[in-house]
Image (spheres, rainbow, N blue to C red):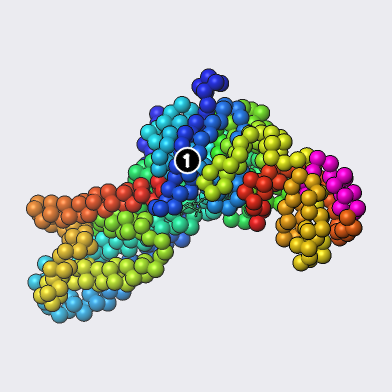
Amino acid sequence: MNPPASTPLIEARQLVKRFGDFTAVGGINIEVRPGESFGFLGPNGAGKSSTMRMIGCVSPPTSGDLNIFGLDATRHGKQIRGRMGVVPQLDQLDEQLTVQDNLIVYGRYFDIPRAECKRRAQELLEFVQLTDRADSKIEPLSGGMKRRVSIARSLINEPDLLLLDEPTTGLDPQARHVLWDRLYRLKQQGVTLVLTTHYMDEAEQLCDRLVVMDGGRIVAEGSPNELIREHSPREVLELRYPAGTNEEHAFEVEGIGHRQEALPDRILIYADDGEVALKEVHARGSIPESVLVRRSSLEDVFLKLTGRSLVD
Amino acid sequence: MSTPAAIRSWEAHFTQYRSVWKTNVMGSFVQPLLYLLGMGLGVGALVDDSGRSDALLDGLTYFQFLAPGLLATTAMMIAANEAMWPVLGGFKWWKKFHSEAATPLTPNEIAGGVALWQITKSCIAVVGVATVLALFPDTRSWGLLLAIVFGTLTGAAFAAPISAWSATRDGDYSFPTINRFVITPLFLFGGAFYPISQLPDWMEPIAIATPLWHGVELCRNAVYDRLEFWPTVGHLAYLVTLAVVGWVMAARSFNRRLTL
Ligand SMILES: Nc1ncnc2c1ncn2[C@@H]1O[C@H](COP(=O)(O)OP(=O)(O)OP(=O)(O)O)[C@@H](O)[C@H]1O
Ligand SMILES: [Mg+2]
């Protein structure tokens, strides 16, 4: 039973996590409502996993309040964990067990009767399209398959809340799309999703709302569209010049559009209309090797907010 | 009906064991059997012929003297190794314990599952050796059943404190050292192969202080129905204390490592 829709499923106030002197999460506030899918977006070391582990009730907050399902996370961890599914950043499957046994053994941790575990395991393997690998050991499976086993395993207790830490990192595009599709279906079934990602397209695809984290803090919050509207003009003009000549060319196109970013391999010009900006570039006699006009994305939002690119 | 959490955690270990049990059981059998035959018969012929064995071995033949001790030494070796790599690996390599910690299981319950499993593994090995002893008329007795309990307890007394150590480690560098400088010396000097009265005077108290000697004494006396009340209570108290204190320390290590 979920609390009434008005009460948040996750509520964090001034949540802090320190490791010794180092502050991994520096006092964040978040609210996730039932049925919502919520994302943490940020570069390496932003504090995404640290936050997820606090929400997962395996890492006690250093300070601040954290309530999940209306229960205090520090006091009711056991109960909260029972209603939650967790897909950790790195798969923690039992390599020596079969796919099916991984699910059954895990279900037993939740005190689900063995026969019921078996039934659910079958269903879940169908859901992640791994029925034919049910009796295979984990070891020979591909990365994408292991990820799908992890997701199936996390659903064995029919959780109300699913935590996914970088669900698709390291997967090829096709495997990512399969996973996105499965997560979308879960969302439709009413499961609340909380995920972290480095990928803008993933956040745009899956998240109703997200926070951008950097250095343990939240630097922006909103729906993907809101964030783009708020922090980045509609279009981006990408200019590529011969290697190593970016700086002089940046000088040539200075002042065009609202804002510019000189990346190592290209110059980005943020403008309401990319074509207009491009005309101006040409008018100044600057000749890039290649040009691309695209809609702005969360990547651009991130770049603006943190001054750093997301993908390493 | 809900099943106690530590038992549900134990089930995972058991499920994994099912796929490897054949080689595993063979392994735990073969070594003690070799010692039993090699030492028991070979050295036995030498000792029993010397004419001094009656006084030294309390009227037992050397084969009879040696055999029950192998229940305790086998439990020690199986349990010690089960408490090293599998415990470290559960944290460091396979993250098995972390994945358990994400469920309603608490670190105490996870440590409990590990302890139960180590006891199970010790018991399986001890039962294996006891089965071999039951094949020989000289060592066949109902006391073997009690000796199985004592042997398993010896395993627990080693597994618990070693687990507490392993659960705090970041690498396995210390494990071969433990085997070389603790387990093997105990195996040789712990009273399984000869009465510790044969040791130099300064070594005897050391042997008495080690858990293996207590386990060996219990097993041997159980098999030949020579258990005396107070010594037995003393041996049991020693082993139980080691197992319990070790487990409390192990559980504390698990708590610390699983709630970072
Ligand atoms: N157990 C720990 N002990 C000490 N420092 C830690 C620990 N866990 C995380 N950190 C530090 O906290 C910071 C945030 O780490 P975290 O794993 O939360 O980042 P992240 O956003 O998930 O990064 P990534 O995208 O690389 O997964 C990092 O600087 C990391 O080194
Ligand atoms: Mg992370």
Q: Height in image: B216 above or below A272?
A: below
Quarter-wise, where is residue A177 in the image? top right
Residue sitting nearer the eye, B5 or B35: B5
The residue at the point 50 percent across, 39 percent down is A28
The residue at the point 53 percent across, 19 percent down is A4
Is residue A91 found left or right of A298 in the rendered image?
Answer: left
Could you tell me which quadrant the N terminus of chain B lies in?
Answer: top left
Q: Position of residue B88 (x, y in %)?
A: 41, 58
Residue sitting nearer the eye, A237 or A17: A237
Is residue B136 found left or right of A22 in the rendered image?
Answer: left
On the image, numbered disc 1 is attached to which residue? A27
Subunit that carries the residue with mark 1 = A
Residue sitting nearer the eye, A54 or A18: A18
Q: Is residue A170 visible?
A: no
Q: Is residue A217 visible?
A: yes
Span highlighted in magenta in the image: A269-283
Q: Position of residue A287 (x, y in %)?
A: 88, 59
Quarter-wise, where is residue B209 in the image? bottom left
